[in-house]
Amino acid sequence: MDKRELLLEAATKLFVERGLHATPTSAISKEAGVSAGILFHYFKTKDDLIDELYVSIKKEFTATILNNLDKINADLGKLRLIWSNSWNWGLDNDLKFKFLLQLDNTSCSVRVKSHPEIIEKYELFNSLIQQYINKELIKNMDTHFIMGTMFGLITSMITYLTQFPEKRNDQVFIEQAWEMYYNYLKA
Amino acid sequence: MDKRELLLEAATKLFVERGLHATPTSAISKEAGVSAGILFHYFKTKDDLIDELYVSIKKEFTATILNNLDKINADLGKLRLIWSNSWNWGLDNDLKFKFLLQLDNTSCSVRVKSHPEIIEKYELFNSLIQQYINKELIKNMDTHFIMGTMFGLITSMITYLTQFPEKRNDQVFIEQAWEMYYNYLKA
DNA sequence: TTTTAAATTGACTAATCAGTCAACAAATGT
DNA sequence: ACATTTGTTGACTGATTAGTCAATTTAAAA
C-alpha cells in the first residue's frame, strides 16, 4: 500500500473534520496507520503536504468537469455537461470538495493556489466561455465574472444537495435548477 | 477605549490574514495592544471568542441587508435593494466578510453557527422569498435552494469586485449583473 | 550472496500554545 | 475616607506541536 497516498487521504479527512491547523501531523500519520516520521519523508513540511494535496485535488476537479465533453456536439449540451459534471463531482467527492472550499476561502497556508497546470485549465475554460459569448449563447460580460459566478452557483448547489440528498434524483428539480442556471447565463 | 472591542477587531484581522488556528491568543492581545491575560477575562476560551465574533458579524450582516427596505414600495425594488445592500456590505467590510466566508466553509471550531438571533433573521428572509414566489416574481423552487444560491451568487460577485474594484462604479456593469441576477430568480 | 540504497520507525527536542494566577490599578459605591 | 468590586497585568505552566535523527527493516542492484 502506498503510504504517501494513505497520508493524503487521511489528511483530507482530518483537515475537513478539524481544520488545517487543528490537525497535527501526528494525527495524520496515526489515521493513515503509519509512523510519525514517514510524513516528513514524503513531504518536506506540513505546508508542503497541504499544497500538494490542494493541487492534486484541484487538478482532479478541473479534469473531471471537462469529461466526455467531446462526446456531445450541441453547444448548449456541452455547457450543461460541464454544469452536471461539476456538481456530480462535488457530491461524489464530498471530502475533497469541502477541502477545496476550505482552502479557497482561506488566505493563509496556501502558497500554491496558482499551480501552472491549474492556471492552464483555467485559461482553457476562460476561452471556452469567450467562445460561448461570441456565439451569443452567454451574456457579454467579463469572462472572469461569468466564471466566478458560474462556480459560485454550482458550489451553492452542491452545498444544498449535500443537505438534501434526495433532490439529486429528483428529475424535475434538476431540470429546474438547470433552467435557472442557463437563464442566468444566456444573452 | 473598550479592550473587548479592540480584541475582536484584532482577532478579525489576524484570523483572516493567518487563519484561525495559526493565530495564537498572544498575537491577538499583542495586536490589540493589551495584556495576554485580559483576553480570557472577556472570553472564557479562544473558541468562545471565535463564536462571539462570528455571531456578532453575522448579525451585523443580516441586519444590514434589510436596511432601508421599508423605504421602497416596489417588490422588485426591494429585491434589488437586498441584492445591493449585500454586496455593498461585503465590499465595505472586507475583513468581516472574509472572516464569515472562512468560518462558513469550515466544519471545525464553530459550535454556534445557529445562534437564535441569526436563525430568526434567516426565517424572516425565508418567508420573504416565499412571498415573492407566491407573487410569481421568483421561480417556484425550494426556498432553501433559492436562498443558498442567491447568496452564492452575491458572494462570488463580492469576490469578483474585490479583485476588480473599478467595476464597482461601472453603472453598465452593475446593471448587467443585476439583470443576470434577476434572470436567474424570475419565474 | 553481498553491497548499496531507499523506506520506515518512534523516541526525542526545542518551540509554541491556551489558559491560570497572584498581584496590582481603577473605578464604584457607601 | 474606606471598602468592594471590576479591570488589567505579565510571568508562569502543563500540554502539544512540527520536525529531527539514529537505528532498523525492506528492496534492489551487482
Image: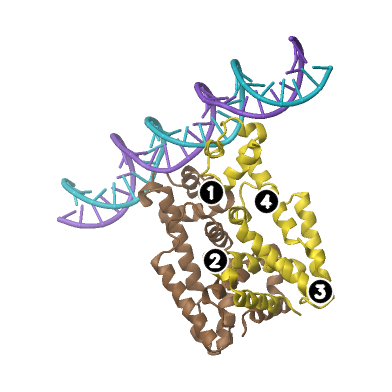
Chain colours: A brown, B yellow, C cyan, D purple
Tell me whether the residue at label 3 lies in contact with that at label 1, contact meaning CB atoms closer than 8 angstroms. Answer: no
Residue plotted at (50% across, 73% down):
A64
Whether discs 1 and 2 lie on one chain: the answer is: yes
* Mark with earlier residue (3, 1): 1
Q: CA distance from mark 2 to mark 4?
A: 23 Å
Nearer to us in this view, B70 or D20:
B70
The amino acid type found where label 3 is placed reads Ala
Q: Is residue B69 left or right of residue D29?
A: right
Q: Distance between the Cα atoms at labels 4 and 3?
A: 29 Å
Q: Secondary structure at mark 1?
A: loop
Please name the amino acid that badge 1 sits on: Gly
| Amino acid identity at mark 2 | Pro
Which chain is disc 2 placed on? B
Position of residue A50 in the picture relative to residue D9 (left or right): left
Query: Would you name the residue on which mark 2 appears?
Result: B165
Does A61 sit above or below residue B186?
A: above
Chain hosting mark 1? B
Marks 3, 1 in one chain: yes
Q: Which mark is residue B54?
A: none
Which of D19/B155 is in front?
B155
Residue B104: give x, y in percent of width and height: 63, 55
Q: What is the distance, in whole Å, between disc 2 and disc 3 at their CAs?
A: 29 Å
Q: Can the viewer see residue A26 in this picture?
A: yes
Verify CB contact (< 8 Å) between mark 2 and mark 4: no
Which residue position holds label 3? Answer: B74
Q: Earlier in the sequence, mark 2 or mark 4?
A: 4
